[in-house]
Amino acid sequence: MLGTVALTLAVAVPAQADPSRHGQYGRATLTGFASLPAQTYVPGSEPSGSLLGTAPSNGITPPFPGQPVQGFSGIVRNHDGTFFALSDNGYGAKANSSDFLLRVHHIKPSFRDGTIKVLGGFNLTDPYGKAPFPLTRQDRKLTGADFDVESIVRTSDGTYWIGDEFGPFLLHFSAGGKLLEAPIALPGVQAPENPYLNGGTPNLGGSKGFEGMARSVDGRTLYPLLEGTVTGDPAGTLRINEFDLRRRAYTGQRWAYQLDSPSNAIGDFIAIDKRRFLVIERDNGQGDAAAFKKIFEVTLSNHGVEKTLVADLLDIANPRHIGGFGDTFRFPFQTIEDVVILDDRTLGVLDDNNYPFSNGRTAGVADNNEFITIRLTRDLDADRRVYS
């Protein structure tokens, strides 16, 4: 089933000029800020970035002395104040990321002192040979040339499902990061990096696969969301597919999310309850050029998809001047790829800093990984299972 009900929302204008533009959830308020320095590397890890050349980017010259703790593109809450954060495929392309090891980092933000501690983590590997196509490394440690991992959920058995953009594929990993099944393809959709393309014509843009992936509140279903429009679909529509975890198969149920602009992209997709979800939608700008960075509530029904504005990430109230910022806080990053529900009015949001290429916070300076919390003016009325 394919359908859309799209609401067109205006590009950001100063909040004081039109308070009503924040919609039914009102203007969000910054309640926490923590940051991890851009040049943070996994202790004792292999060098990386050897395929980036030697020209400096934002003051940082490759190759790098280790594996950077960067590119947070998915998040899992642990309910002990810590989180697992998924790094993306590395340096932005299959061709330059073969020495970037795919990894899930164990992090702990401290909003009291504004820091993020890296407690450890685990690499993603394929020791059982589940991937039926050649990998980059003989030791079967997975790299950014093998998969472009962008979304992650944990199921009740402690294993992880990760959404990939190269296939696009669904990837099932053990609690320690070992691939448990062969990659599961999305029927009828192939990106240019798909290893089964065999000279055929892709019908999805490069690395435009599963950018977001929600898990249903009952834990039985996945809802992977493409970042790109499939050839032949209406401009700016992104397919949401339903995947049954018990049957290990797509159900055939499908919806279409309508971007406010075909040039926008999504960053994350998580469940609120049985039929409502949160999605990050963003433009490609950063710094002063950033004009559209928003979180929407998305309702899936038999009639299509309805969007409701939840938060404008470029216009967050900051009356306590948290983080040393002024009355208005902006999250002006090119890619914002993580949202997590902390309680019924509080969201956590993280950027993907595209190390070392993005400089949305300060021109000419590589972005840090930032973790903010924002409070809404009204409850989400979420299913308690998403945050308890």
Image (cartoon, rainbow, N blue to C red):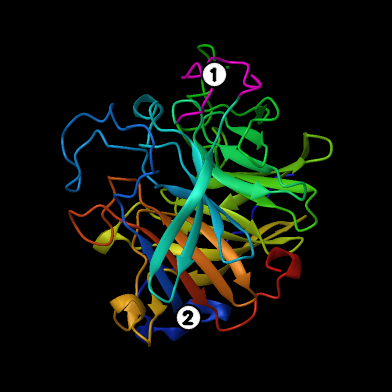
What's drawn in magenta, residue-wise?
A: 127-143
Visible residue check, residue 227? no
Visible residue check, residue 66? yes
Residue 174 x, y percent position in the rendering:
68, 38
* Quadrant in which the N terminus appears: top right
Residue 305 x, y percent position in the rendering:
66, 57
- Outermost residue toward the front? 44
The residue located at (54%, 61%) in the rendering is 339
- Quadrant location of residue 159? top right
- Specify whether 191 is left or right of 242: left
Numbered badge on residue 195: 1
Distance (Cα) linking label 2 and label 1 = 45 Å
Residue occupied by mark 2:
27
Q: Main secondary structure of the magenta part?
A: loop
| Residue nearer the viewer, 290 or 352 | 352
The vertical placement of 307 against 215, above or below, is below
The magenta stretch spans residue 372: no
Q: Identity of the amino acid at label 1?
A: Pro
Q: Report the label total.
A: 2
Q: Identity of the amino acid at label 2?
A: Arg
| Residue nearer the viewer, 184 or 130 | 130
Residue 330 x, y percent position in the rendering:
35, 70
Q: Badge 2 local density, few (<14 within 10 Å), some, or many (20+)?
A: many
The residue located at (32%, 45%) in the rendering is 355
Q: Nearer the viewer, mark 2 or mark 1?
A: 1
Dot 2 falls on a residue whose secondary structure is loop
The vertical placement of 48 against 254, above or below, is above
Numbered badge on residue 20: none
The magenta stretch spans residue 134: yes
- Specify whether 211 is left or right of 127: left
